[in-house]
Image: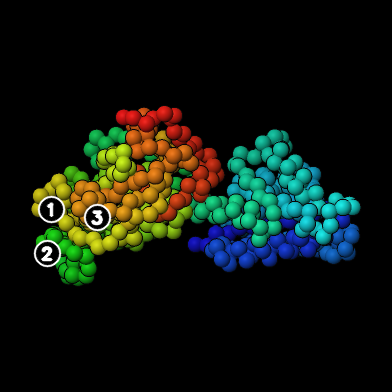
Amino acid sequence: MSLRIGFVAIIRPIFKGDSPAAALDSLEGLERLAANNGFEVVLPELPTGPVHAATGSPLPRFAVHDQASAQLAADQLAAQDLDLLLVQLTTFATGETPAPFLRLPLPLGLWALPEEAGADRTTGPLPLNSLCGLNMTLSFLDRPPVEREMPAKWFYGSADSDWFRERLTPTLTALRGLRALRGARILQIGGTAPHFYGLEQEPRLPGVTVERMELTALFERVARVPSAATEELAASWREGSAVTEEQLRRSAALDLALGRIVSESEYDAIALRCWPELPDETGTMACATLARLGDGAVAAACEGDVMGALSMLALQGMSGEAALLLDLSDVDPERGALFWHCGNGPLSWSAGATRLAPHFNRDGVGTVRDMIVRPGPATGFRFTAGAERALLFSGEFRDVTFEDGGYDGVRGWLSDIRWGKDPVTPRGFVANVLDHRLPHHFAFGQSDLTEGALELCSWLGVEVLEPVPARDTL
């Protein structure tokens, strides 16, 4: 779904610069950005206001000039399902005019223009005083009578300027993550894997709900899948296979049952207790099925890990691509940190050909997706402590072969690691993970999403874990 960004201009018509033209130019620039970045600009529709003193031009219909017109615009925009509200202080204005917008429980951007936007000169009467207005407005955000709880982000420059665009880009990434989490419904099937105490956390984010299903209900759904449907799906899998036809059919039955559950109730993510009961009851492991759910953009976490599913969902929203859930399994000072899991990787993460194989620890039981993680930048992320805190790191997955890529399953060596924005050695990374006592699942998003993820956490009020200095040895 496209992001919806509200835009309103504040204009005091006594300022001599051509503020109506500056606001209209800003709207045109914003709409050009919208066309190229997948968002929609939403405007208030206001009655005709006063004319501009110096030019005689009417104020644009999306511009406010006093507290009453600002309140009318704020009421309209509050009903528009916005992801962000951009308030441009086209001219200086005292606090009563921006206040109705500042009180809205929305992500807020406050935008100032350079003086050149309102005049072709740098002498004579001050044209806009926009930057001063931004400065003053930011100074009282957390003071009475505003007392805004949610953060606000400032922007400066024309819509076509590098500075404005550089600040807007991570904001759009963060907003897509927020939209993915807003109203998210996660289905946990069977609870967490037995005695995986660190995965038993529940999210405490407003609007996120966790629904439950017993494993027995899933097993009943698997048993009811028609054999013709399993035969058809098994025959359509186009990956190299080292499992038997019977194993493929069993995996197909689980695949179809889980896919139907997700589609019927439109769940955004699932967290499945994938062992020990499931292979005993269905004769198959869930790894390849969870991988295929990821192929279809469903965040699917192993071992009943709800917080892992939530973290994957945020990453998928930010990147627009499938997320991946892995364990930290080894460390090497030269190669980096080895991330691995049994066989749950979506195809978009694969470095090349994949194959379907038996589970590494269950002789003769399929089916997992055996693959190397494709080389390139990636972002690791995990909500923890009920989503009050988050781990954020990034790096480059190395270009390796099947022979040198790690153990059977989904695997990749992450190098050039940064904890937040701080470079850390592979050993320093592992030491920090262990010293922070983090859960053992790490969600990965495709590409470097660091700036957007930092902003996502800021909008949510989530603390990003800091690295501990000098953690270079185990």
**Image quarter in which the C terminus is found:** top left
Up-down relation of residue 157 to residue 137 (above or below): below
Labels 2 and 3: the sequence-earlier one: 2
Q: CA distance from mark 2 to mark 3?
A: 28 Å
Q: Is residue 425 left or right of residue 138?
A: left
Q: Secondary structure at mark 2?
A: helix
Relative to 210, say whether 257 is above or below: below
How many neighbours does mark 3 have within 10 angstroms: few (below 14), some (14-19), or many (20 or more)? few
Q: Amino acid at mark 3?
A: Thr
Is 255 placed left or right of 16 in the picture?
A: left
Q: Amino acid at mark 1?
A: Val
The residue that mark 2 highlights is 245
**Which residue is tagged 1?**
365
- The total of numbered circles placed on residues is 3
User: Disc 2 residue type?
Assistant: Glu
The residue carrying mark 3 is 401
Q: Is residue 183 left or right of residue 217?
A: right
